[in-house]
């Protein structure tokens, strides 16, 4: 099945730059495309560490990934 929409992905980056949580919030309509969107985020990790002076030990992001 082809993607009908962008996949909406949410992920949480931990203090050391690792991904603590990663999931699809809204499907693209294609399981294969959704998995590819998750793979894009996984390949970007690890992220830079969160500075110790930051107010939070985790950073949460939500983004659309897709061709639309």
Image: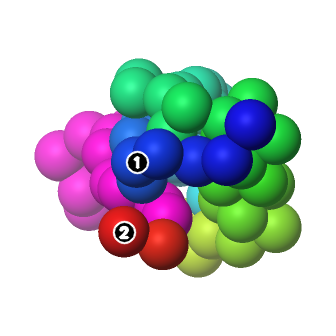
Residue 34: % across, % down: 67, 40
Q: Quadrant of the N terminus?
A: top right
Kindly identify which residue carries mark 1: 5
Residue 6: % across, % down: 42, 53
In the rendered structure, the answer to whether residue 49 lies left or right of residue 61 reads: right
Residue at 81% x, 41% y: name it: 32
What distance separates the C-alpha of mark 2 from that of mark 1?
Answer: 6 Å
In the rendered image of this protein, does residue 10 appear above or below residue 24? below
Front position in the image: 32 or 41:
32
In the rendered image of this protein, does residue 41 appear above or below residue 43? above
Q: Residues within 10 Å of mark 1 (few under 14, many from 20)?
A: some
Q: Residues within 10 Å of mark 2 (few under 14, many from 20)?
A: few
In the rendered structure, the answer to whether residue 48 lies left or right of residue 35 reads: left
Q: Is residue 33 magenta?
A: no
Residue 66: % across, % down: 49, 64
Kindly identify which residue carries mark 2: 68
Instruction: Kindly tell me whether residue 22 is visible in this rendering.
Output: yes
Residue 67: % across, % down: 48, 72
Residue at 72% x, 64% y: name it: 40
In the rendered structure, the answer to whether residue 25 lies left or right of residue 31 reads: left
> For the residue labelled by badge 2, is the local secondary structure a helix, a strand or a loop?
loop
Span highlighted in magenta in the image: 51-66
């Amino acid at each position: 099945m082809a993607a009908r929409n962008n996949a909406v992905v949410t992920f949480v980056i931990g203090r050391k730059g690792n991904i603590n949580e990663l999931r699809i919030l809204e499907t693209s309509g294609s399981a294969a495309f959704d998995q590819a969107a998750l793979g894009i985020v996984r390949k970007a990790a690890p992220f830079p560490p969160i500075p110790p002076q930051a107010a939070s030990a985790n950073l949460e992001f939500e983004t659309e990934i897709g061709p639309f």
